[in-house]
Amino acid sequence: MNSLKPDLMQLRKTRDQYLIWLTQKGTRQKKINEWLGLKNDADDSYSLEEDDVSPHHDEGTWYDMLRGKCTGTFLIRDSQSQKGSYACSVVVDGDTKHCVIYKTATGYGFAEPYNLYSSLKDLVLHYKNVSLVQHNDHLNVTLAYPVLARSPGPQQHPR
């Protein structure tokens, strides 16, 4: 049994990486349970465990998805500080900067009177080609590369 332990630990680590990936892609817990043949949400035998092989011990899985990415790599998530709004994190010259995307009656945007995009997708598509510098002097960057999409390597700039 001891000879199998390294293989089992590696399999668990691989499984956990796939579970994280599925969750980041928006897969619902119920669907994951179905795929794994689990009867209900209470049966969580697949869940990530708090031991030494847990991805929680690997800072690369939670610390900063944008670290080492090229300028213009971004992600959008729910804002923790502004309920009902979103946060945009974007790499600018090797540093990760953050800003709030507001959802108002007139639409999504970074500040009034620019909250005029009907969806987050419309906002991202606009700022793919237009710099955020008009909203913040430290954000002379476009939303060029979604963090989970294939993009140029670290600190490289497209030609």
Image (spheres, rainbow, N blue to C red):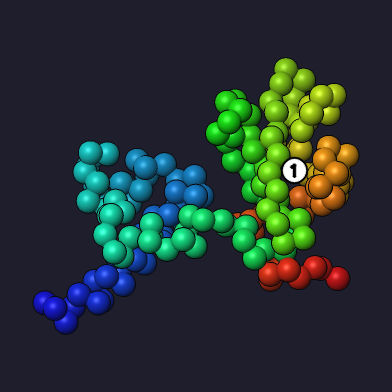
Question: In the rendered view, would you say 68 is above or below 26?
Answer: below
The image quarter containing residue 5 is bottom left
Quadrant including the N terminus: bottom left
Residue, disc 1: 124
Task: Specify few, some or many for label 1: CA neighbours under 10 Å numbering under 14, 14-19, or 20 or more.
Answer: some
The image quarter containing residue 31 is top left
Percent across and percent down for residue 25 are 51, 50
Q: Is residue 106 visible?
A: yes
Percent across and percent down for residue 123 are 76, 38
Please tell me which residue is depicted at 77% across the width and 60% down the height of the picture.
Answer: 93
On the picture, is 126 further left or further right than 1? right
Q: Residue furthest top?
A: 105
Question: In the rendered view, would you say 36 is above or below 9?
Answer: above
On the picture, is 37 further left or further right than 132? left
Quadrant including the C terminus: bottom right
Looking at the rendered structure, the secondary structure element under dot 1 is helix
Q: Residue furthest left?
A: 1
Pick whichever, 38 or 88, lies toward us: 88
Percent across and percent down for residue 40 are 24, 39
Percent across and percent down for residue 131 are 86, 47
Pick whichever, 72 or 28, lies toward us: 72
Please tell me which residue is depicted at 88% across the width and 39% down the height of the picture.
Answer: 134
Question: In the rendered view, would you say 47 is above or below 60?
Answer: above
Pick whichever, 144 or 139, lies toward us: 139
Q: Amino acid at mark 1?
A: Val
Q: Is residue 118 visible?
A: no
Please tell me which residue is depicted at 27% across the width and 70% down the height of the picture.
Answer: 9
Please tell me which residue is depicted at 25% across the width and 77% down the height of the picture.
Answer: 6
